[in-house]
Image (cartoon, rainbow, N blue to C red):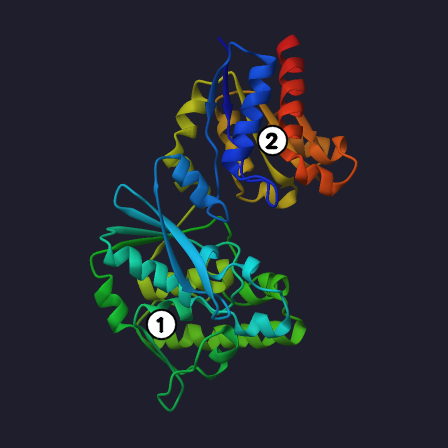
Amino acid sequence: MTRVVIAPDKFKGSLTAVEAAEAIAHGVRDALPEAEVSSCPVADGGEGTLDVLVAAGGRLVELPVRGPLDDTVDARYVTLDGTAYIESARACGIEFVEPSPEVALAAHTWGVGELLAHALDNGARRLVLTVGGTASTDGGAGMLAALGAGVFDAFGAPVGLGGGTLGRVALAELGPVRERLRSVEVAVATDVTNPLLGPRGAAAIFGPQKGAGPREVEQLDESLSRWAQALRNAGAPDVSDVPGAGAGGGVAAGAIAGLGASVESGFQLIAGLTGVAGAIEHADLVITGEGSLDAQSLDGKAPAGIAARAREHAVPLMVLAGRIQLDEGQLTGLGVVGSAALIDHAPSLDHARAHAAELLRERAGELVRAWART
């Protein structure tokens, strides 16, 4: 019996990873009705991680929190075996705002702190914070403030919320947060390696996605530098150059410095919960994919992680994506024996997005039939 493992990430704007896996599974069964199909949707710690965790048996907790610009948003997190998985974007995601220079300076992470506080109050023994897709560049200052930290100017007054306010920060008071998390383990799940500051830092790389122009990028980078200094003065480690500290607009830096968090690979962490590694070891074929397979996919994203596991066990790999922007050499390097881009089989991008499940099923069936014949 042919054993097929299906392990896609989300198709952003179209399908969750769980929905994508279901569509691909239908295509595999169309082509090989007797196949043993293992559905293992994956994520890399960014948007969509909670859907994968729920599919792995987690419990969804929903509550309203303060959004990135203060309007209330309906947020959620997942608990599984005593661990609370907090997706920052559910509280302060870029989806809640219209990017602009003003938004880039004003957006904050207070709601992320509310999610963490709720999880702590309800008995979480471990916290895992995923940090992709935020609207904020506040270095996690809002998150820490929501947990009881003080963020003050030189006169001892609170500086307010948003990355733009951190240009006035002079003092951080972390004692209340440390006391609250004294016996709780915290991890930041990300596969981003950007530091907090500089040309590869949170402001320079991610700020423009949030509406920051050159002037705002410079302002935010300087503000984050002052924030890092205030955290050092409060006895926290220097997070300026820590790989990954710039993730989520620097919310990772706030978690490392203020919550004592370690940094873990988002893909490795989630993959360990879904059982995908063991499934691949015994598979005859692996199918992965995501909305856009491009150069960024090679840098720690979930499909690259799946490809590495498949290569390790000499299992052939197929890739399905909304669009594929890798050349044949790059695909071959990943170990890909068959690939298809939905946009190549649709009259428009809008059509491909609207009919992604149907197209995934059709393309999966075609690829698997061709593979089975060889």
Which type of secondary structure does the marked residue at label 1 adopt? Answer: helix
Residue 242 in view (yes/no): no
Residue 142 x/y as whole percent: 41, 70
Residue 303 in view (yes/no): yes
Seen at 33% across and 59% down, the residue is 116
- Residue at the farthest right position: 347
Left or right for 6, reference 159: right
Marks 2 and 1, Cα distance to the nearest angstrom? 43 Å
Taking depth in this image into account, of 368 and 303 the one nearest to the observer is 368
Taking depth in this image into account, of 114 and 127 the one nearest to the observer is 114
Residue 288 x/y as whole percent: 56, 30
Residue position marked by numbered label 2 in the rendering: 334
- Quarter holding the C terminus is top right
Which type of secondary structure does the marked residue at label 2 adopt? Answer: helix
- Residue at the farthest bottom position: 155
Residue position marked by numbered label 1 in the rendering: 145
Taking depth in this image into account, of 343 and 249 the one nearest to the observer is 343
| Mark in the foreground, 2 or 1 | 1
Rendered position, 109 above or below 351: below
